Amino acid sequence: MKARRQGLLATIVFCMVSTFAHASDELSGKQWTFDVLLDDKRIGFHTFEVQQEGEGQVLTTEASFDVKFLFVTAFRYRHQNTEVWREGCLSSIDAATDNNGKKLVVRGAAGPEGFNLQNGNGSTALPACVQSFAYWNPAVLESARLLNSQTGVYETVSVTFESRDQVPVAGRLVDALRYRLSAQAGDITLWYASTDGTWLGLEAPAKGGRKILYQAVTIPESGPSRQRLAHVTTLLKTGSSKRRPATSPHPTRNDRGG
């Protein structure tokens, strides 16, 4: 359990840097800023920005955490990642992480025979269409496998719709839909605005029975699609969601939610 909780923080932080499978044009030019809290104490920030560039989209993200004990920094984390996406699939990734002194690099690019990934364990050939953890896009809720941008692990995931909820965003409560995403390191709670599907935050357990919370400071004025989120929620409730095949080539329009 201890190792599971330690690994979960890495999954949250290092895997949250991806872009989406469907509404690329709708999300271009969008920005998210989160305060990151350990229990109720702010330990840093995590920002996301996606921009249109030619026929693709470029996601840039930065995270910075410092956990202090008696005025001494007990844990330090820095993460930067740039991802290029085309047709709902990862075209390239260039991620660098300093995990409390441990340096990690993940790089990869799409090629004619699939996605060539390089990390600390060498090179790995992945399917032609790969997605990373894209919490800020509801399309991630239908994914069967996601790429961890810190470790380079191509993880099997599952998602469950839980209930309606309310979460604070910039000092006001926002109506939300709550989901549970089960990944290699544990379960993560995700919130999306019930009106338009905008990603609002996440929460997950941390070491010693504590919790990590991403609390939104700024979010886009409108999210991908209320209809899109309603469609995904219905599929998850009924258990009839057809997950994107892990070995599929570039997805069809129907694969990306119409």
Image (tube, rainbow, N blue to C red):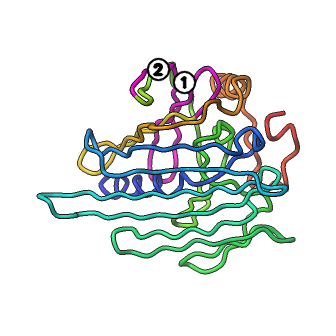
Q: Is residue 117 left or right of residue 115?
A: left
Amino acid on which disc 1 is placed: Leu
Q: Is residue 240 left or right of residue 205?
A: right
Using the image, tell me which numbered label, if any, was put on residue 177. Answer: 1
Q: Residue furthest bottom?
A: 122
Determine the CA span between mark 1 and mark 2.
Answer: 6 Å
Report which residue position mark 2 lands on: 165
Q: Residue at x 57, y 63 (%)?
A: 81
The mark total stands at 2
Which region of the structure is painted magenta?
171-198
Residue 149 shown in magenta: no
Using the image, tell me which numbered label, if any, was put on residue 5. Answer: none
Return the x and y of residue 83 as percentages of the image width and height: 66, 61
Q: Residue furthest left?
A: 70
Return the x and y of residue 122 as percentages of the image width and height: 60, 80
Amino acid on which disc 2 is placed: Asp
Choose the circle earlier in sequence order: 1 or 2.
2
